Amino acid sequence: MPHYLPVPVSYGAPKVKLCIWKNDTLVRDLDVAFCADSPDVIYSYPLDSLDNTFTVDGRPYVPDLLDTPATVSAEADALRPAFHFTAPVGWLNDPNGCYYDGTLYHLFYQHNPVAPVWGNMHWGHAASKNLIHWEHRPIALYPDEFGTMFSGSAIIDHENVSGLGDGTTPPVLLYYTAAGGTNEQSAGQRFTQCLAYSTDGGATFTKYAGNPIIGWIDAENRDPKVYPAGDGTFVLALYLSGDRYALFTSTDLLHWTQTQTLPLPGDDECPDLFPLDTPDGKRWIFMGASGWYLTGSLANGVFTDDGCPPRRFGFDFDNDAYAAQTFYAVGDTRMRIAWNRWHHVGKHGLPYGSSMTLPHTLSLKEIDGMAYLCSTPVDLPEPTKQSAELPQTIPASIDFEIFSDKGSFTLSVCGCSLSVCGSTLLWNDKTIELPCPLRDLTVLIDRFSVEFFGADGLLHLVRSVPLAEKPDCSLSLDGGITVGYTTKEW
């Protein structure tokens, strides 16, 4: 049975080093805004031993250990987003290791378990049957002598080509960046790529004895994304520096050979590489953290674009949604989720920070010789109220149907403004030119965020918003445009 170290934190206190020792050996070191006298919140950190000792800023810390983790207040829980994933406590950012095992969707994520801000990177873990209701799992990956746990991906080794399986259950492999030099244990080391695996269906993970599997190459090379290439081999995409990425191939998921260096203009970090089936065959998509993507083909570990310029996913230039990842799964459905950065939320004093976007299904649509990624949001639970009036409560959604292109309309939600005139949109202060008129629009309003899906999936806008009691919706029509809408509230 695990025990938990109480970590009293004051949001205004300076960060100090909290160290966990065993037999005079440093086991873990955390940067913490430690304040034992008047904490804003008490976090709890899992321990696998009762033999640990602790120091704070070099001085002994002798707490009473907890049998169960500390919980957040009822008030803080009540303010959580209803449909957007948050960590049970602490900070989250990039989605990591997303996969579907045929029954459950598994979501890992960059996680600081002892603060609502970035730092101390671990991998949090949750699982879901429907991508809306999540069961929180124990932390999957902890910092070690190679570094803290930066972003990566997952794959199920169905054929056990890695040899890491136990002969009964296909192993789940997690590929991650060990961020050398970001904790005391890894001082002086560089960023490398590592592997952990599970033989119990993702309940627990063991770090591979042969780590790192890819040594340092360039700058803070990071964020490995692994996917089957479709020819019996596997491909790994890795961010290098600037707008440069690298591709690697492997036959055993352990030993990797670099096959390509390629740019993705306008983007960096967190590559995603995956295929989508189209009527004309399989098309591969190569995407960066900000949502710029190329379409093309993959052969022998080399991605070749189809000659079309980079496009921005969902025509969203706000950068509130970032570092998206598709879920590994056997089959044709390709689900995707991104980090919602809460850029516009402001200080809120909650013990958790940031959320994910609503998961969505991807498809490709071709317009005038250009292939565009489209997204369809995951199904939400049945609403408690449905009407033809603008919503008065949060959470809520509005489904619009635009019957006429003549004139324009402007929608304001939670301080966000979207003006629509045919295929031209003004999104807050940014102009968006769609390749077709906007005929449909779904607006999802949740605590701390608003998402817009429209144009048969071409449009996907994500905006973080300050906490509000009401959505403050308004709709104005001009020039004879005809718009119908239905509101759902929960």
Image (spheres, rainbow, N blue to C red):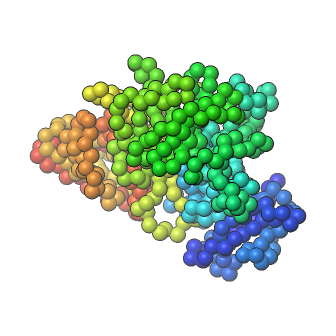
Q: Position of residue 242 (x, y in %)?
A: 47, 50
**Up-down: is 308 above or below 312?**
above
Tell me which residue sits at (72%, 26%) in the image. 161
> Residue 466's image quarter?
bottom left
Q: Is residue 48 visible?
A: yes
Q: Nearer the viewer, residue 29 or 53?
A: 29
Please, which residue is most extreme toward the left here? 479
**Up-down: is 231 above or below 324?**
above
**Up-down: is 284 above or below 269?**
above
Q: Is residue 133 left or right of residue 453?
A: right
Q: Position of residue 469 (x, y in %)?
A: 40, 63
Q: Position of residue 137 (x, y in %)?
A: 68, 48
Q: Position of residue 424 (x, y in %)?
A: 22, 44
Tell me which residue sits at (79%, 60%) in the image. 27
Please, which residue is most extreme toward the top here? 280
Q: Is residue 104 visible?
A: no
**Up-down: is 478 above or below 71?**
above
